[in-house]
Image (cartoon, helix red, strand yellow):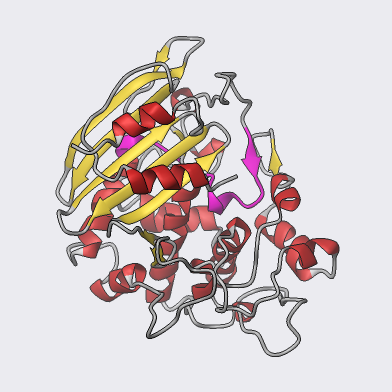
Amino acid sequence: MRFSKLLIILFFSFSKFSSYCQNDSFVGYAVSKVNQDSIISCTTFGYANEENKIAYAKNTIQPIGSVSKTFIGLALIIAQEKGIIDLDTNINDYLDFEISNPNIKEANTITLRHLATHTSGIIDDEIIYESSYTFDVVPKNNLHDFFYKNLALASKSKKKLFSKYKAGENYSYSNVGAALAAYVLEKASGKPFNKFTQEYIYTPLQMKNTGWFFDEIDATKLALLYDENKTPLAKYSCDTYPDGSLKTTITDLSLYLIELIKGYNGNSNLISKNGWSTFFSKQFSENHWQPQNSNPKEPNSGIFIFYFPSGEIGHTGSDLGASSVLKFNPKTNTGQIFMANEDLTKNNVATFKTIWKKE
């Protein structure tokens, strides 16, 4: 649900940001272009609330789906620099219960690096993952309860959420694995993950309209989300919230992308140059580590951030009534963002293509 294959295919095909268009394919959306110094352009279209004719604005808040995972990655690097965690330590050294793959009998150490590159052996089961959603303003379960019930206890859920592969052997994109990395950080730091990211990422970057939960944001700026039939959706939450529930604005996300470009070039004070190097370092290579099922035509991976075949770096996001793309070109040091309060479907692909059309 967090990861739209269609969105990724189109992202590969339309990698140069050159023109925007307004039509009724999306209810509302925003686009921005940045460099490592400033926001070059930021434009919004349509409605944050069509029924009440509230325009989609630069301070409109909406979820960004799996682009949220890049914040998990950056938080892990911050924590490693503070000596709180190490990416290559067994996650059970940090947890208050043990997690092990029931399909592997021999020694099998799962690390945060495995989680951050989707090679841990933890996989998503559609039924279990969809059941983690609730149409309410707070999740049904906190991170501890979700993972204890589904990954620690001997249960059918546990068997369905693990593959037959040892950690590091096979690539399988996992929302559950991503959220587990955030929980490991939470336990290791003694600070709730939402508070950790607020203190060490959003506040330093002046991201004043960003938060994981509804009570952390200004409800008057929140966009309604719409399904493919343009029907408004009720507010919803997810137990594994770090994997895709971050709510932010095009302006705040642009400030974040500026910092990523600065960090890639060694010009950010948020973390050290070595920290940024670890965050962006390509994890897969033929001469080092090439997990099964990793396709050369698919992205290489940093720490919860992807390298696309074009050489651009970033992430895509998709969820109920929301879609987003965040990426930058390391050669030109320019980046682009797309956010919409509607998922990408066959009904709006033409608009998306136009937005991302090559010159």
Instruction: Report the quarter where the C terminus lies.
Output: top left
Q: Is residue 135 left or right of residue 228?
A: right
Instruction: Report the quarter where the N terminus lies.
Output: top right
Q: Residue at x 59, y 60 (%)?
A: 174
Residue 51 point in image, percent of width and height: 51, 10
Q: Residue at x 71, y 62 (%)?
A: 147
Query: Total of numbered circles in the picture?
Result: 0
Q: Can the viewer see residue 246 in this picture? A: no
Q: Residue furthest top?
A: 52
Q: Where are the magenta residues, as a range?
A: 236-251
Q: Residue at x 71, y 47 (%)?
A: 132
Which quadrant of the view contains residue 20?
Answer: top left
Which quadrant of the view contains residue 160?
Answer: bottom right
Residue 248 point in image, percent of width and height: 42, 39
Residue 295 point in image, percent of width and height: 46, 66
Residue 161 point in image, percent of width and height: 72, 63
Q: In the image shown, does 278 or 348 lie closer to the viewer?
A: 348
Q: Is residue 154 left or right of residue 211?
A: right
| Above or below, 104 relative to 178 | below
